[in-house]
Image: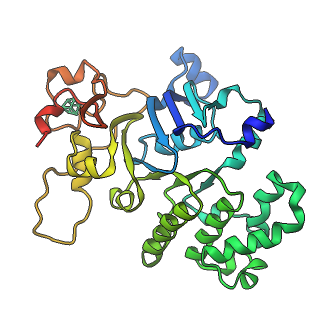
C-alpha cells in the first residue's frame, strides 16, 4: 500500500468524484427531536460528479451555502461522504485506513481562506512551513530548514531569514497568505485545494497572490481545485469550472466556453453580477432576488426554480439531468437550448 500512496500512477484524471453526497444532521435538543419524530439533515452536497484533469485548475463557484467548501474537504479526505466516491489518482479514499490516508495527504495540500486562523499564533513562520515536512518526511530532518527557506523565498518572503523566526501577528495579511502558500507547497503536493485563497487579502495584493499561484502551478506542476464565490477571480486562474447551486452542479465546462456561452440561468445571473469596467456594458440578467433556499428542505424539481425568471410548471416537479449541449459543456436545465446563442 505504501508504494501505491507514494508513487503517482499518472491517471489522466487526478481526481474523480462520483455521485458525492454529504448530509449533516441538524443539531436539536433531545426533546425537539423526540417531538419531531425524525432527524433532519442539511443536504450540503447532493449527488455531485466531476473530474479534475492532471495539471489543470478546476474551479467550483457558487454562492455561500452552495456546498463548494464541503466538496473541497471531501475531495482531500477531511470529511467522509454520506454516499458516493472520491478517487485520487485512481485510489478510492474510502478504501484507506487512517494511516494510509494520512500518507496520501502528502500529495494534497490546502490553502484556506483565513491565514490568521490557519496559522498557529504561537508557532514561528519557519516552524509552520516545516510542519508538513516533519509529518511526511521525518527521515530528511537535516534538510527541512533549507527546504522551507527555499520555498519561502520563492513565494516572496524575502529574505527568508528575516521571516523565519517571526510570528503570524508580526507580518501583514498578504505575507501571511504567502506563508500559507509556502506551507502548502513545501511537501511538493500534486493537488492543492485553494478555498477562497484571496478572499481575505487586501485588494491591493489580490492580483499579486493570484499571479503567484498561476506561476507556482506551472513551476511545481500542480493541479488546483479552486473554490470561489467570485467568477472574476476564477477567470484569472481556472481552466475549467463547475457552477454549484444548493449542493448540485448546474453547469460544467471549459472556463472560456462557459463564460462565452453561459447556458444555465443561475450562471447567467452570477456572470451578470461580476463588476465590469465599462458602466455602459449591458447586463443580460440581474442576480435573482431572494436568499438561497433552505438546504434542509430543498425545493423539488429544479432547485433553482423559486428564483428562476424562466421557470415553468415542469421545473418544480422534474429534476433536470446534466446534458452535454456543446462539446464538453454540461448543463442541468430543462430549457437550456433556448439560452443558446
Ligand atoms: Fe430555470 Fe427551469 Fe431551467 Fe431550472 S430547469 S434553471 S427553473 S428554466
Q: Position of residue 88 (x, y in %)?
A: 60, 37
Q: Residue at x 59, y 69 (%)?
A: 177
The image quarter in which residue 182 lies: bottom right
Q: Residue at x 84, y 67 (%)?
A: 143
Q: Position of residue 196 (x, y in %)?
A: 49, 57
Colour setup of the view: rainbow
Compared to residue 149, the image places residue 225 above or below, namely above
**Tally of numbered discs:** 0
Foreground of the two, 155 or 318: 155
* Quadrant location of the C terminus in the rendered image: top left
Q: Position of residue 187 (x, y in %)?
A: 72, 57
In the picture, measured across the screen, residue 295 lies left or right of residue 319, that is right
Q: Is residue 125 visible?
A: no
In the picture, measured across the screen, residue 337 lies left or right of residue 184, that is left
Compared to residue 280, the image places residue 195 above or below, namely above
- Ligand 1, seen in the image, is in the quarter at top left
The image quarter in which residue 137 lies: bottom right
In the picture, measured across the screen, residue 255 lies left or right of residue 325, that is right
Q: Is residue 134 visible?
A: yes
Q: Residue at x 21, y 72 (%)?
A: 277
* Quadrant location of the N terminus in the rendered image: top right
Q: Residue at x 33, y 46 (%)?
A: 254
Q: Of all residues shown, which one is farthest toward the top?
A: 37
In the picture, measured across the screen, residue 280 lies left or right of residue 297, that is left
Q: Position of residue 11 (x, y in %)?
A: 56, 37
Amino acid at each position: 500500500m505504501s508504494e501505491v500512496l507514494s508513487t503517482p500512477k499518472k491517471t489522466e484524471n487526478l481526481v474523480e468524484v462520483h455521485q458525492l453526497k454529504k448530509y449533516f444532521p441538524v443539531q436539536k435538543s433531545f426533546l425537539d427531536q423526540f417531538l419531531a419524530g425524525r432527524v433532519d439533515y442539511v443536504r450540503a452536497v447532493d449527488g455531485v460528479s466531476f473530474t479534475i484533469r492532471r495539471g489543470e485548475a478546476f474551479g467550483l463557484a457558487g454562492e455561500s451555502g452552495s456546498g463548494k467548501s464541503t466538496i473541497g474537504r471531501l475531495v482531500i479526505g477531511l470529511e467522509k461522504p454520506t454516499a458516493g466516491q472520491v478517487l485520487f489518482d485512481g485510489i478510492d479514499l474510502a478504501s484507506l485506513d487512517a494511516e494510509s490516508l494520512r500518507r496520501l495527504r502528502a500529495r494534497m495540500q490546502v490553502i484556506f481562506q483565513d491565514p490568521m486562523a490557519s496559522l498557529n499564533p504561537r508557532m514561528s513562520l519557519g516552524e509552520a512551513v516545516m510542519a508538513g515536512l516533519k509529518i511526511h518526511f521525518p527521515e530528511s530532518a537535516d534538510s527541512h530548514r533549507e527546504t522551507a527557506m527555499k520555498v519561502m523565498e520563492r513565494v516572496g518572503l524575502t529574505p527568508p531569514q528575516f521571516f523565519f523566526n517571526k510570528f503570524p501577528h508580526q507580518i501583514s495579511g498578504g505575507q501571511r497568505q504567502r506563508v500559507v502558500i509556502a506551507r502548502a507547497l513545501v511537501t511538493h503536493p500534486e493537488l492543492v485545494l485553494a478555498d477562497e485563497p484571496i478572499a481575505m487579502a487586501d485588494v491591493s495584493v489580490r492580483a499579486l497572490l493570484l499571479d503567484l499561484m498561476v506561476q507556482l502551478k506551472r513551476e511545481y506542476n500542480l493541479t488546483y481545485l479552486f473554490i470561489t464565490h467570485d467568477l472574476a477571480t476564477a477567470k484569472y486562474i481556472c481552466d475549467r469550472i463547475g457552477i454549484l447551486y444548493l449542493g448540485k452542479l448546474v453547469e460544467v465546462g471549459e472556463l472560456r466556453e462557459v463564460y462565452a456561452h453561459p447556458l444555465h440561468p443561475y450562471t447567467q445571473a452570477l456572470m451578470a453580477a461580476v463588476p465590469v469596467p465599462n458602466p455602459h456594458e449591458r447586463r443580460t440578467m440581474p442576480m435573482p432576488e431572494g436568499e438561497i433556499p433552505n438546504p434542509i428542505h430543498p425545493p423539488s424539481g429544479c432547485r433553482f426554480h423559486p428564483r428562476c425568471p424562466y421557470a415553468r410548471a415542469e421545473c418544480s416537479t422534474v429534476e433536470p439531468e446534466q446534458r452535454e449541449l456543446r462539446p464538453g459543456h454540461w448543463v442541468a436545465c430543462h430549457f437550456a437550448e433556448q439560452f443558446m446563442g
